[in-house]
Amino acid sequence: MTEDDGRKMRDALKKSFPPVNTALRRDLWPQVLRRLEDRPARVPWYDWALVGLSAAMFLAFPRLILVFAYHL
Amino acid sequence: MDLDLLQRFAIGEIDAFEALTRQFQGEIYSWIVRIVRDSGAAEDLTLETLWRIYRARHQFRPDGNFGAWARRIATNLAIDHLRRKRPEEGLMTEPAGAPPPDPLVQQETRTKIQMEFRGLPAKLQMAATLALIEEQPYEEIADALGTSVGAVKLRVFRAVRILRKRLNRLGIKPA
């Protein structure tokens, strides 16, 4: 690809895609705030998996509770 | 940038996040709309970017560059949007009091160029849009993509090569 080819392609693209208005027309903060209020903090799935795994371990090996309590 | 403000943001203070939103929302929107070229989608993506910024606040280092970090998040979202969008949906471009189109480039040809360009892989399309249409510095594009200037140049080169092949097949030769 020559430099001239590149320039021709750039010119063709610039003619095909008119400039866009890059100015934001309104303040988005009210919507951001609403979204923050709408979405309560969720516990991620891996935390639930960890809780389940721990519970299963304690059920299978009850003595682990003592080891766990010792390290707390 | 106010270090105290960034520290307060990182620990989740809403007031600090509000100040940063008001300061950076225009910049984020302007970056996204240059890539997706659709004001409605750009607003939605700006909102999503701000939301993700807030969710990822713990990963932000207060001594870092907030603007660059925000731009990287925005760029990833914009690329995802380009991936999801089908080429025929990409024909909407919004002139901003734009100069009248060059009469030498006919409407049909422009439409075909737009369609073929929208059909490029998202990362190539994004790099070519910013570098060739928006004439953004390669350094800025590389920073937003978290890659090197060389990699961006390669993407632009590949985008142009693929586009030329496709246009040649349609009998279009950019003049």
Image (spheres, helix red, strand yellow):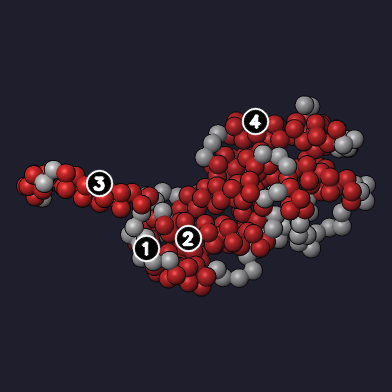
User: How far is the residue under mark 2 from the one under mark 1?
Assistant: 13 Å
Say which chain tag 3 marks. Answer: A
Find disc 2 in the rendering and name its residue. B51
What amino acid is at disc 1?
Ala
**What quarter of the picture does the C terminus of chain B occupy?**
top right
Side (left or right) of A18 relative to B56: right
In the rendered structure, are the residues bearing label 4 and label 1 in contact, judged by CB atoms less than 8 Å apart?
A: no
- Where residue B146 appears, x then y in whole percent? 52, 40
In front: label 2 or label 1: 1
Tell me what residue is drawn at x 60 percent, y 30 percent: B150
Question: Going by the picture, which residue comes out furthest to the top?
Answer: A1
Side (left or right) of B167 relative to B139: right
Side (left or right) of B21 relative to A1: left
- Report if residue B128 is visible in the image: no
What amino acid is at disc 3?
Leu
Camera-nearest residue between B83 and B103: B83
In front: label 4 or label 1: 1
User: How far is the residue under mark 4 from the one under mark 2?
Assistant: 32 Å
- Where residue A44 appears, x then y in whole percent? 36, 54
SS under mark 2 = helix
Whether labels 4 and 1 belong to a single chain: the reply is no
What amino acid is at disc 2?
Trp
Q: Quadrant of residue B45?
A: bottom right
Say which chain tag 4 marks. Answer: B
Tell me what residue is drawn at x 21 percent, y 50 percent: A55
Find disc 3 in the rendering and name its residue. A53
Find disc 4 in the rendering and name its residue. B154
Tell me what residue is drawn at x 59 percent, y 61 percent: B44
SS under mark 4 = helix
Find disc 1 in the rendering and name its residue. A41
User: How far is the residue under mark 3 from the one under mark 2?
Assistant: 31 Å
